[in-house]
Amino acid sequence: MQEKLSWKSKISFGIGAFGKDMVYAIVSTFFMKYLTDYRLADPVFVAVLFAAARIWDAVNDTFMGIIVDNTRSKWGKFRPWILVGTLINAAVLIAMYADVDLSPTRYAVYVGIMYVLWGMTYTLMDIPYWSMVPALTSDENERNQISAIPRFFASMAWLIVGSGGLYIVKYFGGESKTLGFSRFAIAVAVIFVVSSLVTVFNVREKVVATSGSGEKTDLKKMIKVLFKNDQVLVVLLIALFFNVAYQLSNSFALYYFEYVCGVEDELFSVYTLVAGFAQMGALLGYPILGKKVGKKLLFILACLLPAAGFALLFAAGYFAPTSAVWVALSSVVVNIGIGFMLVILTVILSEVVDYGEYKMGSRNESVLFSTQTFVVKFAGAFSALVSGIGLKVIGYQANQVQSATTVAGMRTIMIAVPAALMLVCLAVYLKGYRLGDKNYRRILAELDVRKHGEKAEGDDGTRMADFDKTDTGTEKPDDGGQI
């Protein structure tokens, strides 16, 4: 019987996500607008830079997964990389937002180098951080908790940066937005380092592979892992469509509320503040709801709620574009679903790790989680291209009143496209995912047999050939702990 995780470990792991996501939030939410509106960079240059950097990151992610999988140290696989990556990435973040006085050409070169370095160094700590999830516990209810807790802290970070970011920038820099962002970045970097240290010193990995744990991972084995584990592709497709939708709406929100609604500071802050609380509520509720209604229903809600919320925001943009009430209501509906999806993606990828061990005898957490990070980065690259080139195509002019065509284009990019992509996520899940509650319990029972050499409780002798290929999670999971 595996030792239960202490609440100190669970909370310490979650705190690591707080600083990590503050960093990601200040870049994802503000950096594009920082470049186009405050540094007056060409939107196409920004789009190409963001896309190229994310694609390069995506390639690096796969190799980082191999490196982490092959790491053997007294601190385990993951914590050394979390520490090193945090320290380097914090320094690069400060340099990226530095209030430097350069010519446009030199600044383009400078910011290009810094942005690529930021993505590479973020990978150093992000992949090992999320790869720890399946290594912390194999208990289904504890894994629901350990997947939800860091997402809760992450949502808190996005809430603070999103709803308060513009006010913090004004407080730090006065009329100088560049100075304000520079000081804001320094503060975020300090918080990032402190929160990662809490994780590194208080969290230990507990789950190891039942066999093959000493085998080195290389590129050939990584390809084998990805192709032999048939559920990886399903989860990665879901992650791709979700992250394109999520990142596209996030990156475009500042433009939408300023140029479509005409009230940037107030409405953007309302939207992101409510989003943070809605996501945190969903994250807290997931372990409770998961054991009562099952994973499948929660996944359906995770897709349908954002689509409905975007539809509400689209309608409100016509009949009440400056209404904080309608913006808040639409944000609640969108982000309850987003909160569910953030947990579910971590949960089902952790299940895919166990499934891979079931089929091949090795866990390969970092390889599988790095492929998800690859997809997230690829989604970011695509979103950046759509955002930057989209701004150019629809005729966007920085700091000016936009034409009717531009406004319609902004509505499409911010709302219509993400809503459609959430429906695509649902179709992929219902069609392809088969590690529902019934099948997953069979996998855990078989792994327990291998570890202990005896029949495990709940093991009915079912093997791969007997799997229910329609099992996407229709059964309610057993009762267990909750947040």
Image (tube, helix red, strand yellow):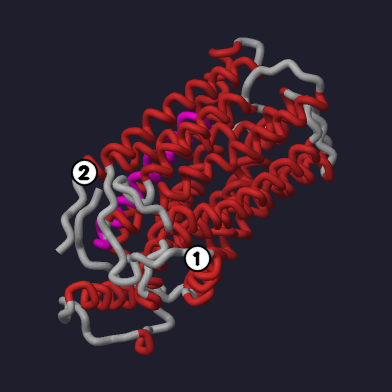
Q: Which residue is mark 1?
A: 235
- Element at label 1: helix
Q: Which residues are magenta?
A: 138-162
The foreground one among 253 and 351 is: 351
Is residue 473 among what the camera can see? Answer: no
Tell me which amino acid carries mark 2.
Trp
Tell me which amino acid carries mark 1.
Val
In the image, what residue occupies the spot 68% across and 37% down? Answer: 256
Q: Is residue 264 magenta?
A: no
Bin the neighbour count of mark 2 within 10 Å (Cα to Cα): few under 14, some 14-19, many 20 and up.
few
Q: Is residue 468 left or right of residue 460?
A: right
- Residue 444: x %, y % from top left: 27, 72
In the image, what residue occupies the spot 41% across and 63% down? Answer: 364
Q: Residue furthest bottom?
A: 465
Q: Is residue 249 left or right of residue 467?
A: right
The label on residue 212 is none
Q: Quadrant of the N terminus?
A: bottom left
- Residue 478: x %, y % from top left: 22, 67
- Residue 413: x %, y % from top left: 70, 48
Q: Which residue is mark 2?
A: 7
Q: Residue furthest top?
A: 174
Give above or below for 43 relative to 300.
above
Is residue 243 among what the camera can see? Answer: yes
Which of the 4 image quarters holds residue 63?
A: bottom right
- Residue 49: x %, y % from top left: 73, 41
Give above or below for 312 relative to 45.
below
Q: Is residue 153 magenta?
A: yes
- Element at label 2: helix
In the image, what residue occupies the spot 40% across and 53% down? Answer: 71
In the image, what residue occupies the spot 56% across and 29% down? Answer: 93
Most frequent secondary structure within the magenta stretch = helix
Q: Count the numbered circles shown.
A: 2
